[in-house]
Image (cartoon, grey):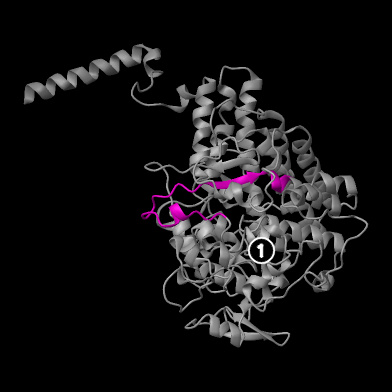
Amino acid sequence: MKFKSAKYSLLIVGLLVLMSCNDDFLERYPLDEISNETFWNTENDLAVYNNSFYNLARNDNDVPILMGHDEGFNSHKFGIWYTDEYTDNIAPRHSRHTQYQQVRSGKHNVPSSANGDGQWYGYKGWNFLRAINVGMDNYDRAQIDQEVKNKYIGEARLFRGWFFADKVAKFGDAPWVDHELNVDSEELYAARTPREQVMANVLEDLNFATQSIPNDWGDGGGPGRLNRWAALLVKSRVCLFEGTWRKYHGGSNADMWLQEAAAAAKEIMDDGPYTLYSTGDPENDYNAIHLITADLTGVPEVMYWRRYELGILTNHVQSYHRGYNGGATKSIVEDYLCEDGLPITLSPLYQGDAQIEDVFENRDPRLRQTILHPDDVLKYGYGNFDTRPYPRLRGMEGGQTIETGYHIIKVFDPVTSYATYNTSNTPAITLRFGEVLLNYAEAMAELGRLTQEDLDLSINRLRDRVGMPHMDLNNIPVDPRYVSDDVSPLIVEIRRERRVELFMEGFRYDDLRRWKQGKKLEIPSYGIRWDEAAMARYPKANVVSSLVDGVPYVDIYKGTDWANPVFDESKHYLWPIPLADLAQNPNIRQNPGW
């Protein structure tokens, strides 16, 4: 043993002598692992590194930008479909969706940390930003043409700009960081950077991205990498949010942001390879792309989507969504126009809601492609092809029951709805061309520059798909329900179109906040009419009602903690920063009112 120890000691001494005599030895790196010093060389290195952004962004709880469906157990409550539950579109009551009920009723408090049910909207995801900034500090080391490097720099800056835009939208001021930090970095304890400065940086990032990312990465089947057209839509979305926020909440250069939103959308409309999906079937085309169950590659309207595949990434979003979402509300159902292009308050075609079948008569075809008509149960395979009469409300025996009576069949797939736990491959659409058209129309209208030609290029293309009359700039209806919104009838109708077209796609909550229309969340959520005829038709339903203009309707939250919703204008437009984050950095101040 002593011999071996002496032998090893001599060997170590010898190695030290060799190392002291050979500087090259000191520059050698491990042969069995990748090091930062040897990695950043080729285009493939940059592409492989940027792949990590897509993987990190898959966690929507921490990085809620490329919103899809969560995987595993959390797909029952986190993802793009559920964000409408914060709003007047959908009325959940299940205990696993308490978070949504709290926020929609204004009963949420400052979370202790960004974990648990609060994590989706928590002050998290900074590891995603760190990964981006590590790349930004190293891309230029690659020995390749600058134009090639810029593709990947642009991709990283797209993610960074989008990340910060999301933080600003939720929290206002945000700590801007554009390089890698270490444990000694002063920025770790810096105050938040003012909103307008952060968003100026965001716009720089998005502009660089839209100028540098290729139109097509040539990476084969979808969804692939975010291309330049996707970057333009992200820019349009971000700029529309910021422009309308500044217009209605106060801030400088609102028109500049709206112009940027319109220009980005128009470039896609004029030069991009996308169009609305349409086969000439107005009774089905609107919902068709949302019913594709696996592969959205080649669908002309889909600009970016998330793929799920058995054994790799799966969900059970269909199974849980049906029972947990509570159903659509009376509010959204009543916003669909009649087939003459008039709101239900003005149209002689409106048949009322004495029974649910009447609701669908003479209405925008998107209504019947979104909400279940009792005659369409077998068409959609709803309730596992259940033959019981629908709708079915809480308390009724058998079948799929909900709270409001308005079952949602947009994005419904009977196969995956009843698949074994977490074996579904339901895709999630993140970016689609329909939003491009809506962003353009709204930005131009907010600028006061919308023309009939603009309408025909945007809103009226959406209406053509479902056979609805065109919006006529010289004949905009005045819906008495919205005169108190203090905006023009044109803006009202464009917002209505957005609400209808993008229902359950993750926009309504942000839209209400940027328009400064939070008071709409104080209106109680109702379901179907609940008179004596309804009670006889739906025996054993365990629901309660309240009068609306003298007519009884199912009152979703009556008798619960979420009755009597409130919206505090002084605080609820921004979200609270978790206490743990405040404790870690004393220079971070809580948002007003929290």
Residue 219, image quadrant: top right
Secondary structure category for the residue under label 1: loop
User: Is 38 left or right of 264, judged from the image as shown?
Assistant: left
Across and down, in percent, residue 528 comes to: 62, 76
Say few, some or many: other residues with alpha carbon within 10 Å of mark 1 (under 14 / 14 to 19 / 20 or more): some
Identity of the residue drawn at 62% across and 56% down: 506
User: Is 373 left or right of 76, judged from the image as shown?
Assistant: right
User: Is 576 in the magenta?
Assistant: no
Q: Say which of 533 and 248 sits in front.
A: 533
| Res 567 seen here | no
Identity of the residue drawn at 52% across and 80% down: 538
Give the number of callouts: 1
Across and down, in percent, residue 93 comes to: 51, 73
Q: Quadrant of the N terminus?
A: top left
Please give the residue where the numbered disc 1 appears in the rendered image.
574
> Would you place residue 195 above or below residue 54 in this image?
below
Q: Amino acid at mark 1?
A: Leu
Q: Say which of 311 and 471 sits in front.
A: 471
Identity of the residue drawn at 36% across and 26% down: 33
User: Is 418 in the magenta?
Assistant: yes
> Would you place residue 277 above or below residue 3 in this image?
below
Q: Which residues are magenta?
A: 411-436
Extreme-right residue of the structure = 474
| Res 234 seen here | yes
